[in-house]
Image (cartoon, rainbow, N blue to C red):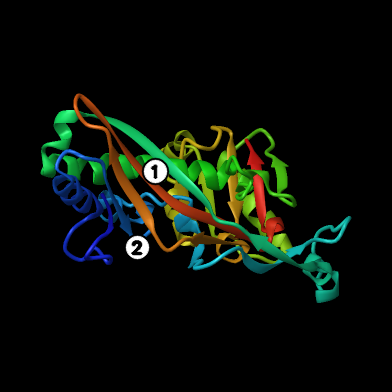
Amino acid sequence: MDYLIDDPALRERGPGEELAVAVARAAGGDAAVRVRRPLTTLFPLASTRPRPTVREQTKGGTVTGGPLRYVRELPAEGGGASGTAYRATPEAAFRAAAAKAELTEISVAVPVPGELCRDPALLARFVEHRVIVRLCTVENEVLLHGSGDGAITGLLNLEGLRRLDAPAGDAMESLMAACAEVEETGGSCDGLVMHPALYWRLVGAGALPALDAAGLRITRTRMIARDRVLLGDFRAGVTLLDGEESALALRGHGDTATITASMPLGLAVHLPQHFVLLSL
C-alpha cells in the first residue's frame, strides 16, 4: 500500500504516525507514505535541542521538475588578496557561467523487530526519533562528501575550494584568520562545520559567545575529520535543493522488517571560492 497522506502539512500527525497508520491499513502487507516535506527537517528534538545540520547553514529552494539551471561564478586564474579598490578585488575578475544542478535520492534503511510493526505508537516514535535522525546523518555526509552518482559534488570536494594549514598554536586564532580569509573573495563568513571533538574544545575554552556574537552558526558532525574545519559564506555560496516529496516505507513482516526513509536532494554551488577548508 502506497498513498499520499491526508495531511501533507503534518499539522495533526507526524511522519512516524502517518507510517503507523499506513501499516495498520495494510493489515500485514508492506506499507509506504509520501510526505510533502523534507524528512530531515522533521526530527522532533531539533526544536528543543538545537544542533544545526549542514542543511541549516544554507538557503534553500524546491525543484518541481528536471535539472535546475543557475549561475556559477569562478575566480580568475592567479587571483590574489583583495586590494582597496573594486578593480583590485578578486570578484572584479570572477567568470560567470551557466550551470546545472541535479537532484539525487538519499536514503537510509533500518531493520526492526516484527513486534514493532504491531505497536503503532512505538513504531511512530521509533521512526521520528531514530530513523529520521539517521537520515540527517546521511544528508550531512552527502552534502560534505558528495553522492555516489555525482549529482552532488560535496562541499569538501568543490572545485575552487581554498585550503589553509593552521600554524601551531591557538585553534581559535587560526579559526578567526580563516574566517577573514573567507571574506577575501567578497563574501561574509557565516558558518563553520567541525567535528564534535573540536566543538567541545571550544566550549571548554569559552569561545562560543565570541563566535555567536560574530554571527557564526556552527554545525558539529562526525562526517568531517577531527582536524578539519569548513568555513564559508554558506547562504550566498550555495543553495540546497529539495524535491516535492519524501517517502517512508516498511517492508517485510514476521520476525523482522525494514523501515526505509528517503528523499530527493540537490545542491547548487554558486561561489565555491567562498569556502575555506582549514587543517588544524
> Residue flagged by tag 1: what amino acid is it?
Leu
Residue at the image position 25 percent from the left and 61 percent from the top: 5
Residue 261 seen in render: yes
At which x and y percent is residue 271? 68, 61
Q: Is residue 115 above or below residue 266?
A: above
At which x and y percent is residue 79? 85, 58
Residue indicated by mark 1 = 135
Say which quarter of the image contains residue 268: bottom right
Q: Secondary structure at mark 2?
A: loop
Neighbour class for label 1 at 10 Å: few (<14), some, many (≥20)? many
The percent coordinates of residue 94 (x first, y second) are 80, 67
What kind of residue is marked 2? Arg
Mark 2 neighbour density, 10 Å: few (under 14) some (14–19) many (20 or more): some
The picture places residue 158, in percent across and down from the top left corner, at: 69, 49
- Front-lying residue, 232 or 240: 240
Classify mark 1: helix, strand or loop.
helix
Cα gap from disc 1 to disc 2, whole angstroms: 16 Å
Q: Which residue is mark 2?
A: 36
